Image (cartoon, rainbow, N blue to C red):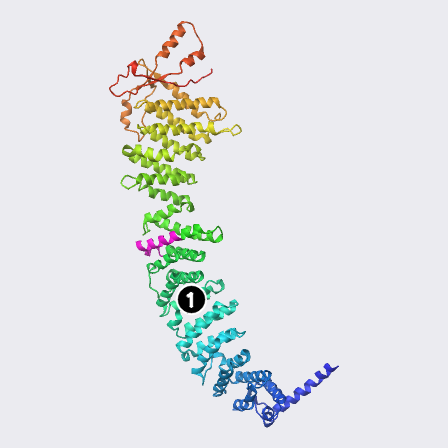
Amino acid sequence: MSKDAKTDKSFPEKFKRWFRLERGNIPGNREIRLTEELRAELGSESPTSTRMKAIKELNELLASRKLEENGIEKLWLLVQDLLSLTSPAEHRHATLQMLTTLTAAHAHDRLGAMRHVFYNYIAENYQHEEIRPMFDFFREVVSDGKQLEYIEELAGPFLLEWLPFVLASPQTADALNLLVNLVKFNAAYLDETVVTGYVKQVVLQLLQAHNEAEALLCLRVLDAVLAYSYLPSPALPTFITALTRAVNVPQLTQETWKIMRNLLGTHLGNSGLYVLCRLIQSNGDPHMVRGAIFFLTSALWGNNKVSSLNYKPAAVLPTLQQAGKNGHVLVVYEVALSIQKLVSKLSLELHLSSWDLLLDTLANLFEHHVSLEEGLEKQSILNVLKDIMDVIEQLIELQQFGGSYDKFFSLVDKYAHLRPETSVLRLLDHQAQAMDPLHPHWLAKLGTLLNQYYCHDPRPAVRTKALAILSDVYNNNRYLYGTDMVRNVVTIQMEGIEKERNVGVRTAAVNLLVHIAVTQRSSVVPDILSLLEKIIIAPYNNTKENDQVLRESEAADVIAAVAGLIRIFKKKLWELPSIHAIQAYKILILCMEHHYRKQAIMDGVVKGQMQIFEMIFEMRANSKCQLGFLSTPTRSNGEGEDSFSSMLPQYTPYVLVNDKHSQRFSSADEQGEDDPEQRLNDSNTVIASETANEDSDLTSKDSTIVVSGSVINVQG
């Protein structure tokens, strides 16, 4: 009931107030006249409640209408006593609200000298009053920073003094918008010290911004300072440092880069680059260093580079090299991206010294990458580094790489496990060029190459390539250094070849060993034959009862070893020392013995056994008991001149068949004995070796050495 009564009274009361205020005003006039009655209500003689009621009523009217001419001065004289610190805060705030509304309505035309009066009041009392009402009043006094008439020299320094307190209050957004307009419309009245102070305060606020909108407002202030004012040199480091930190925020990156690009395009561009380089070299906050690297490289060789900066990459590559020593993941990633853009766009402008710096930086990045923990960041960095290396390799193929080949390939060599097969194969081709006696320590380097890429690299193609390089180096130097290569490199690196899991690599190694054994006559041949023996016997020694029977494709190395030993045997029959031929023959017979003892293992592989049988069936002896074959062995390419093969006799003078066994067999036949097992046992020794020198009588019975062989029991 009481509520309805208040509602009923509200309209008459409002009407009376309106009538009292409008009384004396000309109908249709939009200006408010301060009548005698209104001045009496606002004056100090009236009770405080009456004055406050009149002020609130006037505040409502001022929102849409203006005071009469000189009304601002009259009204100020009537109410200024209410702004005294002795007045209650409620009265002061209500009066300030009315004055704020009044100023907003008259700021552009009738405020005049009263702007100075209002400013004086604010400057004298802002420290003793709440920030919100006082700052709202100040904003309207200066038209939100657009109008400084009568206070041009005062507003800037005063706001700088007040700014830290306002930015720490809920009025932060209003203060930043005020700064933007103040710089845009009144930059001519702002001294260097004032602008520097604004920049420092805004930078501090930017670094502790609570949300994206506040950070963007801070950037707008900095952009306005750069665009409409003169950025003082003392403020440049602070200005750039703030941008290098802000650019790390994804929502601010585009706006920040736009401001930095505008800065570097001005007369301060050279100084800006210097500041960026100093920030990078300071090795300080990783986010700051990363932002500085981004700005520096984007300005010089980015997609939207600053055309007024005429600097070559060589000018900043030492700085990037120093940044590459920073192990923080953000800095490593940013340096890698910068180098990626450089080699993709300006590779033809880089000279030898620049490439050296770039490769040194890459080496540091790879080192940091290896030390990082497994994760998305590590993989992202590796992807960028791989792309850089791929681009450089493309330049090498196109013969457009201006750096040191040795330095680049040493980097590939160090991190070969991170490179694809094609890259490592290209590396091996390059390293093969230094594998000759003209280079110091070439044998040691050859051993290192094989140890790394044959013994430890898991990729079959790489291991096979290493063997191919060894074969080429051997062929080129075997006449002078063949024995040293076999003794110091081949036998060491090939140890344990029978344990190799990849049959292709084993087969390639067997072919190389056979080639070396065929072309060598020194004391290293028995070592090579021992390696081949291990390969032939390995399936029988390492296979368990439940293992699957080998297929022919899985025993390609054994087949190649058998064929190679047959070739070695036929070749060494006509060479001294003949012990090499006899050792090869013994290995072949040993292979047959193992086959028939464990026939199931190699039951599906008949090619090797067939080759041994064919060799045995081709063997012949002449009347002098000299061993030979139906056809004279020919020399393969690389083993000697083909013209000499036709000069070889059909029977070798170095290996003899012991004729005592044939006489024993003839005597048994005459006595009618026909015991096959006894005959096989008696034929256990069938080959004699002649190791005498050239002056020895090859037919002398005293110079033959009987060597125990093995019997092959053939049923049928």
Residue 44 vs 632, above or below: the answer is below
Tell me, yes or no, if residue 450 can be seen here.
Answer: yes
Residue projecting furthest to the right: 1
Decide: few, some or many residues near mark 1? Use Cα within 10 Å; few <14, some 14-19, many ≥20.
some
Residue nearer the viewer, 85 or 298: 85
Query: Residue 511 appears in which quarter of the rendering?
Result: top left
The total of numbered circles placed on residues is 1
In the displayed image of the protein, which residue is found farthest to the left? 695
Q: Residue at x 44, y 82 (%)?
A: 154
* Location of the N terminus (image quadrant): bottom right
Relative vertical location of residue 23 with respect to residue 673 in this rendering, above or below: below
Q: How far across and how far down the image is residue 51, in percent?
A: 61, 89
Q: Nearer the viewer, residue 349 or 5?
A: 5
Is the residue 579 above or below the residue 490 in the image?
Answer: above
- 204 magenta-colored: no
Q: Secondary structure at mark 1?
A: helix
Residue occupying image coordinates x 42% and y 23%: 590
Residue under numbered circle 1 = 241
Q: Could you say where residue 653 lies in the image, as x and y percent from the top left?
A: 29, 19
Q: Nearer the viewer, residue 204 or 353?
A: 204
The spot of residue 74 in percent (x, y) is 54, 91
Q: Is 353 one of the magenta-colored residues?
A: yes
Identify the residue shown where x is 43% and y is 30%: 556
Q: To which quarter of the image does residue 538 belong?
A: top left
Q: Residue furthest front?
A: 86
In the rendered structure, which amino acid carries the disc numbered 1? Thr
Magenta range is: 346-364
The picture places residue 668, in percent across and down from the top left corner, at: 40, 7
Q: Main secondary structure of the magenta part?
A: helix
Q: Is 184 placed left or right of 434 in the picture? A: right
- Residue 228 appears in the picture as rendered: no
